[in-house]
Image (cartoon, coloured by chain):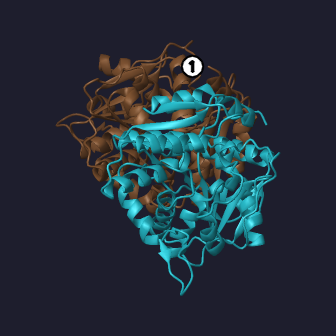
Chain colours: A cyan, B brown
């Protein structure tokens, strides 16, 4: 964790993730997470003018990729000999459900810190997965402080949403599966697109894809107004989004790239693509009508960017990750009315 | 094709389908049809009180299982040395699209006979797949006669919707994939549920499942009012549905079991289960909300029967085929409003 430079004080090294960490995560989640397929449709190929493949993580346990990282984080802690009396996380969305399900599967109590005004259905879903939900007032209280307090008082393990090597390695198992399925199909993926918020998913995928297919170009896909990773990659340093930005892509609203994820993404990504809310909603409708998959707006931004022709046009084989499907009935009806 | 009985005139034997025919079909469609996965969700297991697996044929090329049988039928004819100048089929739904796509993939012209008042979107989808569409008046004209006329005049191959050994064998490839995936998971399926109309899908699946898992019980699932197979199985002879029956399960409205499918189903099925339109619609909503799959009402009747607790309750591993996802926006919105 620390490197010594002659005569200087020890400097904390940035934690990172090696391909071996992703391989270890793949062994941990085997038989626990759903092994999602790599799907294709002649119609999607025609529409994009290239061979295209979709990795539907909406079909994952709890409806998003988040289960992978959460399971890997908790299981790693258990393997590392520690007793894990419980876990705590803060999230009002996909991460909450992923942590709750992973903890339940491993027999570990979970407390999820959620805003008191979160949609009742999300609070109920999280409770239905066996987690205890602690509500906080998002205007007067700090959810991270509450989670840290619980972790300290009860010796619980914090399961962060993205900025953690075990979380990144867990999400990276998607990249291993993509590489395995491409090998089985005898194809070389040359472009991989995945949604990006704090960068845990894309940094994990890039770590695995880069190890297996070093020539593949990996792009982070973000909602317009939340293109912090695209801008940060271009600037070479972590930039924040404007405080007043809004998007229907509720899974992708982080403020800035992570401290751990950004150096990985700087090294491995080829850039960032964006999609507007209207484009994301059109991609949700396309997925439901044509691919028969229910994808949430944030889960559909990579598909949206591809449908808008923003992926490199020389690509022969493009892989698109649809990262989640936890969309409200109302939003899906809206997509189907457009 | 003919068996001689001493002193009697030759009697045409009923054509049937052997497991080897299904295996040959699996080799033909490999790399052409989508190898759909066998999916599971902890939430579905809890809901059904058993381990459950879904075979999502809504993810198949053209959004339903129909592509499998159509491809096998046309490819078999090409292999059997005949030139196939073109194919003709009558259907306003999933079979039309399956035949159009299979013919296009094999470079064979296709004419689809569709009712003039079919939904414009279905006519357009079929044309978009490269087929020529011939419209007929469903009140004054006989679509089968029109198709036979085209077949005779142009020497085109008729691709029937279900009552044909090559079609049955093609649909049966679903059963082989179920058996393969169960073997990979180390489980023995003891109950298999699939939607049933003319019986091509279920007879093919039963042929394959019975060969690999002789103790598995296979059930045909039908909409209320169209339970001709369930009643025919109980009666031991082919019965018709009432002429005035109606259902939103537009893929499952055949009048009676097929001449070729029924003897197979009589021998291999354990019975029939039914679901009402409201139950099918609730299953469509469950699939979209919980499984993140878009399933049409007819494609969801087996899931509906399972959700209603109609499958044998002692089952440990139940496999549910969701056969198609070609649902109108309006119907999906309706399901999501219930």
Q: Nearer the viewer, residue B305 or A143?
A: A143
- Left/right placement of residue B21 relative to residue B301 reads left
Dot 1: element: loop
**Residue A254 can be seen in this image:** yes
Residue B159 can be seen in this image:
no
Q: Is residue B310 left or right of residue A300?
A: left
**Residue at 65% in and 39% down:** B113
Figure check: A291 above or below B333 = below
Vertical relation: A259 (above or below) B299: below
- The answer for which chain carries disc 1 is B
Q: Quadrant of the C terminus of chain B?
A: top right
State the residue lying farthest toward the left: B6
* Percent position of residue A184, x then y: 44, 67
- Report which quarter residue A314 is drawn in: bottom right
Total numbered labels placed on residues in the image: 1
Horizontally, residue B293 falls left or right of residue B188, namely: right
Res. A191 image quadrant = bottom right
Determine whether B223 is above or below B213 in the image. Answer: above
Q: Residue furthest bottom?
A: A6
Q: Quadrant of the N terminus of chain B?
A: top left
**Residue indicated by mark 1:** B247
Q: Position of residue B144 (x, y in %)?
A: 58, 34
Q: Residue at x 66, y 23 (%)?
A: B334
Q: B212 or B40: nearer the eye?
A: B40
Neighbours of disc 1 within 10 Å: few (<14), some (14-19), many (20+)? some
Image coords of residue A60 (percent x, y) = 49, 46
Q: Residue at x 71, y 69 (%)?
A: A271
Residue A135 x/y as whole percent: 58, 30
């Amino acid at each position: 964790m620390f490197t010594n430079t002659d005569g200087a004080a020890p400097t904390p090294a940035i934690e990172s993730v090696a391909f071996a960490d992703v391989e270890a995560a793949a062994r941990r989640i085997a038989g626990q997470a759903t092994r999602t397929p790599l799907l294709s449709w002649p119609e999607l190929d025609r529409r994009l003018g290239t061979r295209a493949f979709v990795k539907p993580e909406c079909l994952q346990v709890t409806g998003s990729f988040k289960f992978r990282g959460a399971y890997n984080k908790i299981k790693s802690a258990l393997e590392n000999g520690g007793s894990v009396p419980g876990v705590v996380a803060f999230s009002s969305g996909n991460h909450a459900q992923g942590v709750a399900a992973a903890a339940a599967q491993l027999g570990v109590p979970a407390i999820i810190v959620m805003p008191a005004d979160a949609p009742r259905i999300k609070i109920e879903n999280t409770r239905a997965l066996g987690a205890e939900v602690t509500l906080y007032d998002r205007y007067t209280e700090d959810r991270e402080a509450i989670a840290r307090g619980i972790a300290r008082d009860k010796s619980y393990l914090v399961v962060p949403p993205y900025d953690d090597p075990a979380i990144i390695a867990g999400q990276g198992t998607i990249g291993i599966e993509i590489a395995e399925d491409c090998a089985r199909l005898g194809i070389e993926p040359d472009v991989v697109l995945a949604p990006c918020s704090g960068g845990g998913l894309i940094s994990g995928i890039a770590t695995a894809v880069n190890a297996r297919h070093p020539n593949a170009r990996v792009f982070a896909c973000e909602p317009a107004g939340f293109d912090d990773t695209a801008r940060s990659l271009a600037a070479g340093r972590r930039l924040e989004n404007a405080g007043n930005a809004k998007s229907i892509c509720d899974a992708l609203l982080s403020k800035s790239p992570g401290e751990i994820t950004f150096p990985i993404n700087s090294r491995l990504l080829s850039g960032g693509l964006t999609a507007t809310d209207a484009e994301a909603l059109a991609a949700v409708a396309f997925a439901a009508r044509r691919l028969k998959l229910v994808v949430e707006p944030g889960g559909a931004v990579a598909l949206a960017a591809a449908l808008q022709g923003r992926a490199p046009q020389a690509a022969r084989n493009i892989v698109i990750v649809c990262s989640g499907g936890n969309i409200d009935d109302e939003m899906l009806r809206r997509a189907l009315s457009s």
